[in-house]
Image (cartoon, rainbow, N blue to C red):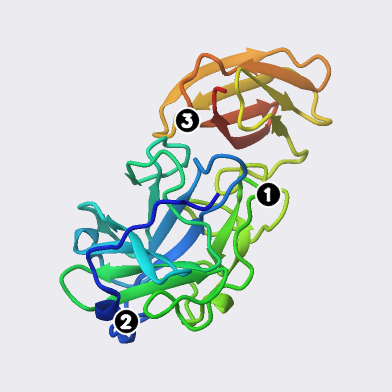
Amino acid sequence: MKKSLLFLSFIFIAFVTNAQQGIGTFGLVINEVDYDVPSTDTTEFIELKNTGSVSIALSGYAIILHNGANATNYDTIFLASYTLNPGQYYVICGSGNYVTNCNQTETALADFIQNGAPDGMAIWEIGTSNFIDALSYEGTCVAPFSEGTGVVNGDNNTSNQLGLSRYPDGTDTQNNDVDFSKHCTSPGVTNAITTTNCDGTVGIENESKNSFSIYPNPSNEVVNISTGTDKGDVTLSVYDFTGKRIDSRQLKNNAGVVQYNTAQFAEGVYILSVTIADNTVTKKLTVLHR
């Protein structure tokens, strides 16, 4: 839902509107954004990518978030001390850690990115008038919060796993509506080609002879693991968002669906690795106690 809290960044619009010439000339880009999901927006994120050939010290940059409806800035995210090497990604998420590969958390558990019509964001080089990259969505914001035409068809709140991505990954024609489109989200990894049936698996799912599925996702107390036509007992390993294995067990597969208790876990994002014989699929699971 649209945030009601709007406040000016300490940077005046009169200052930033003169800096458009810096956009698109540097290797650091806004590569993927998920700003609107069903119900509470706990899985919002902004992904940056270094598309250049040299390492970038992120502590010299900030992301300014812009309300396009009244042309004011509503937040400034100062990037942490982190060296982003060529080809690497950097993910900013809410404080709940519901996003895989998150590098920097914001104080807001949810709704730290506004929902458009239009809204935008830009990467600012701190202490200068340089704006490195920009994204305007659900319309075109004033300079420097857009490149060319803003994305016409924005994100939507019908899926937890659809967002706006540069596709092909990292492409930059300096026109938002050309570069960005709706794809299955893939924070911290190469942007996905897929645009439907995301199922919370993009970026971490391996190919399978038969597609396993997990539901409900998010899960409260129990998750069902459907193995389709694959037969035999299931070997299940569970990893937290840091990659640490926190559980491993065999589950009886009597009717093509097995159940696993998730009430034991704190709220957050986990990775489930499911194996039957030589067939392994890895999926993302969000635990959200209601």
Between disc 3 and disc 2, the foreground one is 2
Answer yes or no: do the residues labelled 3 and 1 have beta carbons within 8 Å? Answer: no
Within 10 Å of disc 1 (Cα), the crowding (few <14, some 14-19, many 20+) is few
Residue shown at 30% from the left, 61% from the top: 85
* Quadrant of the drawing holding the C terminus: top right
Per the rendering, the mark at residue 158 is: 1
Residue shown at 49% from the left, 83% from the top: 148
Residue 39 pos. (x, y %): 60, 40
Q: Upstream in the sequence, badge 3 or badge 2?
A: 2
| Figure quadrant of residue 279 | top right
- What residue occupies the far left of the structure in this picture? 127
What amino acid is found at the position of numbered circle 3 in the picture? Gly
Per the rendering, the mark at residue 179 is: none
What amino acid is found at the position of numbered circle 1 in the picture? Thr
What amino acid is found at the position of numbered circle 2 in the picture? Thr
Against 290, residue 211 (above or below) is: below
Disc 2/disc 1 C-alpha distance (Å): 34 Å
Which residue is disc 3 drawn over? 268
Within 10 Å of disc 3 (Cα), the crowding (few <14, some 14-19, many 20+) is many
- Of residues 43 and 283, the one nearer the viewer is 43
Against 245, residue 84 (above or below) is: below
Disc 3/disc 2 C-alpha distance (Å): 39 Å
Between disc 3 and disc 1, the foreground one is 1
Which residue is disc 2 drawn over? 17
Considering the numbered disc 2 on the image, is that residue within a helix, a strand or a loop? loop
Considering the numbered disc 3 on the image, is that residue within a helix, a strand or a loop? strand
Residue shown at 64% from the left, 32% from the top: 217
Within 10 Å of disc 2 (Cα), the crowding (few <14, some 14-19, many 20+) is some
